Image (cartoon, rainbow, N blue to C red):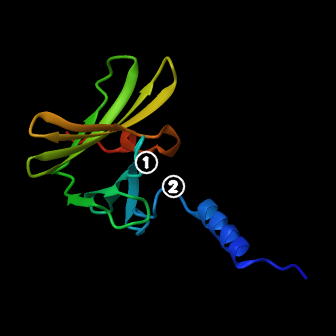
Amino acid sequence: MVRVSWLGAAVVALAMCAQASPVRADYCGDREAGTVFHCQLLGSSRQVTVCQHEDGSYQYAYGKPNRTPELELRRTKEAAVYTPWNGIGRAIWASLSLRNGNYLYEVSFSYDKFDQTEAGTLTVYIGEEIASQRSCRPDTLEQTLFDLEQDG
């Protein structure tokens, strides 16, 4: 018979939870939404997630993983600003922005064709000025920005 102390059992349980826990909380997993953008922010314990619901609306969430978001917005597709790559330059990119009063929350993704590197960014604007810009940890980046429909 193998005896395990309560401390040993707790360590094993925590290790199993850490392995089983996804990087992204199942925020978009309500079966009515798909992940458009997600990452943990470099040098931070926060993450950003943007989901698209079946009705086309977007939901933005910012905060610590597996917790209630510190900021959550839901905007119609018409209220969101999708900017696709214009075909110029060495990097292919796309961005999606959601407004909240005088604030604009923009998630963007780029792929450098020559270096073959990916980058994700969260930029927060107040009016026209950049208030904050954070890079994504590359190993946590998920995005489908290139797959969004272009209207017009």
Where residue 28 appears, as percent x and y from the top left, is: 40, 62
Circle 1 — which element?
A: strand
Residue 130: name its quadrant: top left
**In x, y percent, where is residue 26?**
45, 64
Classify mark 2: residues with Cα within 10 Å, few (<14), some (14-19) or many (20+).
some
Q: Mark 1 or mark 2, which is nearer the start of the sequence?
A: 2
* Tag 2 residue: 23
Q: Quadrant of the C terminus?
A: top left
Q: Mark 1 points at which residue?
A: 40
How would you rate the neighbour count of disc 1 (Cα within 10 Å): few for under 14, some for 14-19, many for 20 or more? many
Q: Quarter holding the N terminus?
A: bottom right
* Residue at left offset 41%, top offset 40%: 136
Are the two marked residues, 2 and 1, in contact with CB atoms closer than 8 angstroms?
A: yes
Residue depicted at x 83% and y 80%: 3
Determine the residue located farthest toward the right in the rendered image.
Answer: 1
Near-viewer residue (112 or 3): 3
Residue kind at label 2, given as amino acid type:
Val
Which residue is painted at 22% across and 60% down in the image?
74
Q: Which of 129 and 13 is in front in this view?
A: 13
Find residue 142 and report its horizontal and vertical position in percent: 46, 46
Residue 51's place in the image compared with 105, above or below, is below
Q: Left or right: 50 with respect to 98?
A: right
Task: Tell me the element at label 2.
Answer: loop
Label 1 sits on what residue type? Gln
Horizontally, residue 72 falls left or right of residue 126, namely right
Residue 143: name its quadrant: top left
- Residue sitting at 14 percent across and 47 percent down? 103
Q: Residue 142 carries which label?
A: none
Of residue 151 and residue 81, the one placed in the foreground of this image is 81
Q: Is residue 139 left or right of residue 124?
A: right
Mark 2 vs mark 1, CA separation in Å: 8 Å
Give how far across and how far down residue 30 sits, in percent: 40, 69
